[in-house]
Image (cartoon, helix red, strand yellow):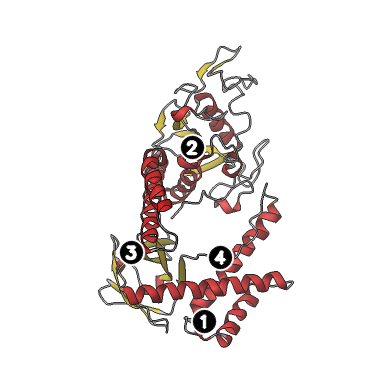
Amino acid sequence: MIVLEFKAYPNQHQEKAIQETIRTAQFIRNKCLRYWMDNEKVNKYDLSKLSTVLAKEFPFVKELNSQARQASSERTWSAISRFYANCKLKVAGRKGYPKFKKNARSVEYKASGWKLSQERKHITFTDKKGIGRLKLKGGYDLHFYDIDEIKRVRIVRRVDGYYVQFCVRVERTESTRPSGRAIGLDVGLKEFYTDSNGSTAPNPRFYRLGEERIRFHQRRVSRKKKGSANRKKAVNRLGRQHLKISRQRKDHAVKLARCVIQSNDLVAYEDLRVRNLVKNHCLAKSINDVGWYQFRTWLERYGKVFGKVTVAVNPAYTSQNCSSCGTTVKKSLSTRTHTCKCGCTLDRDPSGSQSLMGETPKTALSHHNAAINILNKALSTVGHTGTKASGDLASIWIGENLSKQAGSMKEESSRL
């Protein structure tokens, strides 16, 4: 399944219709969630039936396409099933109990309720919400895909406008020659990652670079009168700045992950609990800015596309253990060089003990010794697909999604 995104250009009347459509989808989702909370043994089909009942009860719900109503109920069940799965897997911390939507940003249609023009440059929504015909602009050519392959169509609202997404059922695969190389990655704050060969990738620090502009727009927002049109404009400019940083971070993760996957046959990395790491108030901003989880997600996606092996290993003791003999060599944060009795000497942090803005790097991050240990752990478990690595807290099923791994955490939310 691939997602093709196009920029839409609605007029003022169409914008109001899209906003009403999104609010209707949000209303259905919240009603389904309340029904699940108030009743026992509610399943997916009960929520689908409820969407039909709501259409008979509320005229504005009936105006929405029937399959779009079903898609809203399915979204509710998706959140509920994810909560059940986290409870069953005994994920550490909060299990993601479903919450009511207060400011939804999208609505999803299925096979009906929309129609593409012959030149595939316009889309017309045929339900009674009044959205009508929208112009599409993007870098993809929908002529390459059959209409039957488009399974979902979403309208997404962002601070810089509206977008239409097409979910196409196509298996994306690309063939590459085997490189014969395996690599271990240890992510960090000073350097984005250090691999088992000693090479490093710089941390771009997009939020740090754009923080001055963000503060400027935040001051402009605080000076405007609440509820005024000027305040709305100032909030929109602030949101655009956050969206720009989010897109920069994603673009960096996508390009870097693709390069790493294409250059190696096996890629090993730490199974970090980002949600737990950001509890450190001294490093939370830097950890969120670097975007480790987003990089990991794209590593796994490109691993499937190019047919490469990606393995997540437990990060415990990867910094303390010697990569040569396996002996535990305890170190403090101030100790930057790994020195073992066996004669192995490696730089623990090639960039030094202090990172940008005076922050101290987290233990077991950005050092050569840990990257080698990560690779060794991965190689010892590759032949045991479906089992847990020695001492690992999370399963490392090769080729599986993050949602099926017990220790996986949700992606850092990007402020749009």
Give, as a three-letter code, the residue at label 4. Lys
Depth check, front residue: 172 or 30: 30
Asked if disc 4 and disc 1 are in contact, CB closer than 8 Å, the reply is: no
For the C terminus, the image quarter is bottom left
Q: Relative to residue 149, is residue 308 depicted above or below? A: above
* Residue 320 makes an appearance in the image: yes
Residue 359 pos. (x, y %) = 50, 29
Of the numbered discs 2 and 3, the one sitting upstream in the chain is 3
Tell me the quarter of the picture where residue 20 sits: bottom left
Q: Residue at x 54, y 15 (%)?
A: 344
Q: Nearer the viewer, mark 1 or mark 3?
A: 1
For the N terminus, the image quarter is bottom left
Asked if disc 2 and disc 1 are in contact, CB closer than 8 Å, the reply is: no
Q: Which mark is residue 386?
A: none
Of the numbered discs 3 and 4, the one sitting upstream in the chain is 3
Q: Which residue is mark 1?
A: 61
Q: Which residue is mark 4?
A: 101
Give, as a three-letter code, the residue at label 2. Ser
Tell me the quarter of the picture where residue 43 sits: bottom right
Of the numbered discs 2 and 1, the one sitting upstream in the chain is 1
Of the numbered discs 4 and 1, the one sitting upstream in the chain is 1
| Gap between marks 4 and 2 measured at Cα | 28 Å
Residue 349 pos. (x, y %) = 49, 23
SS label for mark 4? loop
Q: Relative to residue 272, is residue 60 depicted above or below? A: below
Give, as a three-letter code, the residue at label 1. Val
Q: Relative to residue 351, is residue 183 depicted above or below? A: below
* Residue 109 makes an appearance in the image: no
Depth check, front residue: 175 or 389: 389
Q: Which residue is mark 2?
A: 286
Q: Which mark is residue 6?
A: 3
